[in-house]
Image: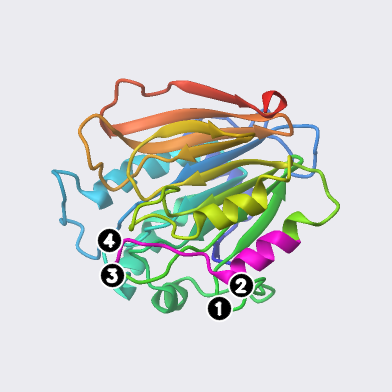
Amino acid sequence: MPGIFHLPMSRKNFLGSSAAIVGGLLVGQVSADDDTQAARLALLSDTHIPADPTNEYRRFKPVENLKKIVPQVVASQPQAAILNGDAARLTGEVEDYTVLKTLLQPIAEIAPLHIGLGNHDDRAKFFRVFPQTGNAKSVVNGKHVSVFELAGTRFVVLDSLLYVDKAAGLLGKGQRDWVKSFLDQPDDRPIVFFVHHSLGDGDGDLLDFDRVFELMVPHRKVKAIFYGHSHRYHVEQRQHIYLVNQPAIGYNFADQQPVGWLDATFTPTGVQLVLNAIGGNVAKDREATKLDWARV
């Protein structure tokens, strides 16, 4: 059940719109078919969009936050974007996704947007608003898994939704078996995974993370796992795999954490992450972090 939101404009309209927004930043745009070059992705997480635009939490209004971020993402001209779960505010209502779809449309017009699911999403209601495309097929029965390739790197968006509006997440045996078969393929290109739930051993984390990690560790081609859920920005390394906790867009849980998104440039040898903080702790806004696959 790949959840891909993409509304490509005609080339004429695309060029006119892009020039109006970014003043000619199309120069130097990288072809997705050129594996020797870089791929620019916009990494979003935890938008928590409600149907009511006035809804707020911890003095943050998720709708207003996303309205600030969308023009930044469009200006960055990404080749793809990923929203790593908790797209909706609390219980994943159709009305939440309807508002979200309207807000995300400018991004979807310039790049495919892969939307993962978190514990505040509802799988059935999500697909009522973001229906599958005609040629989409599920790689894991009943799950929402997306796989795509750019610039010599394979990206996999997994589905850790277990219960709606309850903290814990689970990939489950079917998805773990698929991950194993995917990793056993004779292909050494770098792989980066995305999953919503945090990678700890708490009751509200990804409950089968240890089993999943055991599948990944023997494969040096697995370079990083990106996740959300905890509403903080943090990078660490466990064995040869980077674990990247993405900042939330809707709101933070602690004042020292930023609210924002990551502008990521991937190459076959690593990734550069640039934090775009629009709220919370903005002290590290525009700070770049480089993760080098060659060193792990």
* Mark 4 burial class by Cα count in 10 Å: few <14, some 14-19, many 20+: many
Mark 4 / mark 2, whichever is N-terminal: 4
Q: Position of residue 167 (x, y in %)?
A: 31, 61
Q: Position of residue 156 (x, y in %)?
A: 63, 54
Q: How far apart are the alpha carbons under marks 3 and 1?
A: 19 Å
Which of the two discs, 1 and 4, labels the residue nearer the N terminus?
Answer: 4
How crowded pointer 3 is (Cα within 10 Å; few <14, some 14-19, many 20+) is rated as some
Rendered-image quadrant of the N terminus? bottom right
Question: Label 2: few (<14), some or many (≥20) within 10 Å?
Answer: few
Nearer to us of marks 3 and 1 is 1
Which residue is denoted by mark 1 in the rendering? 142
In the image, residue 261 sits, relative to residue 168, either above or below, namely: above
The residue pinned by badge 3 equals 91
Is 211 situated left or right of 119 in this image?
right
Residues at marks 4 and 3 touching, judged by CB atoms closer than 8 Å: yes
Instruction: Check residue 174 in the rendering and tell me which mark sits there, or answer none.
Output: 2
Residue on which disc 4 sits: 89
